[in-house]
Amino acid sequence: MVQTRATGRGLAYALAGTVLVVGGSLVLYFSFNYFIARSPVQVLTGAPTGRITGDTSVVLSGSGSGLLTQLANAAGGTIPQGDIELVYLSVGTTTEGGGALINALQLPAPSILLRNIDDSSSVGILHGDEGSRAFFVLSAPSDNPGSSHERVFAGMLSWESTMGQDLAQLYPSYPIQVQLDASGTPATPVAPHFVDETVQSHDVRALKDADGETILLYGFRDQTTLIIARDETAFSILLARLSASQ
């Protein structure tokens, strides 16, 4: 009888040990997978560096209007509010940064602008107040900041007449509310137009629609860094990220 009890206890201990081992393994397995699923996606290893850091990254390919459509579609993805996703260009077996991506977009911007931005420029996607939209951080050569600033600004001013149309895929217009005149007839809406604004002590030029909504804006962070973004909130987030990146 004593042997039977000892044997029973031995089997019970063995069974309990097995349960503990299996249970512990399952806990470790699910914990590991939970944290892996919640880990942030890292910026592409070995990608070219730019003026601004990102939280995630995406790589596109192609050129011209097709690449512009890819960039617009990439901005339709879901990223956390306030996060920045940097966009790179795949060229053969290499990954290029924002400067190469801007050139590949073949935007009809004035040549004086395109000639005065360098490879450290960045293109990305930012989740602001009204969703995710693309942004540009254009980096001008630092060898002669004053002249670079003047040339880039002159190029942007010259581009204002078509910029809204050229970047409409990235910064679409908002629905316009119909306004009625005194006789009840729908009034002719005011065409989008640029106005001067100030965002966090930085002078910007904002493209406004008939309802006063900002379609896009641009402004200098410093003598060699120009930001193009959706709205004032996006501009402010990019200012803060640029300061943190440096």
Image (tube, rainbow, N blue to C red):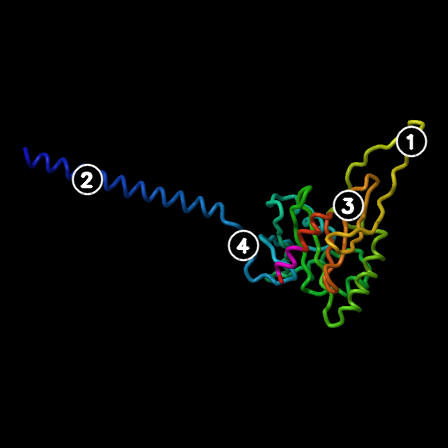
Kind of element beneath mark 4: loop
Q: Looking at this view, is 102 or 136 the one in front?
A: 136
Name the residue at 49% across, 49% down. 39
- Residue 91 position, x and y percent, is 64, 60
Q: Which residue is mark 4?
A: 42
Q: Residues within 10 Å of mark 2 (few under 14, many from 20)?
A: few
- Residue 10 position, x and y percent, is 15, 39
SS majority, magenta: helix
Q: Residues within 10 Å of mark 4 (few under 14, many from 20)?
A: few
Q: Amino acid at mark 1?
A: Asp
Which badge, 4 or 1, is on the more N-terminal residue? 4
Which badge, 2 or 1, is on the more N-terminal residue? 2
Q: What is the CA distance from the residue labelled 4 to the residue labelled 1? A: 54 Å
Q: Nearer the viewer, mark 3 or mark 1?
A: 1
Q: What is the CA distance from the residue labelled 4 to the residue labelled 3? A: 31 Å
Res 181 label: 1
- Residue 28 position, x and y percent, is 36, 45
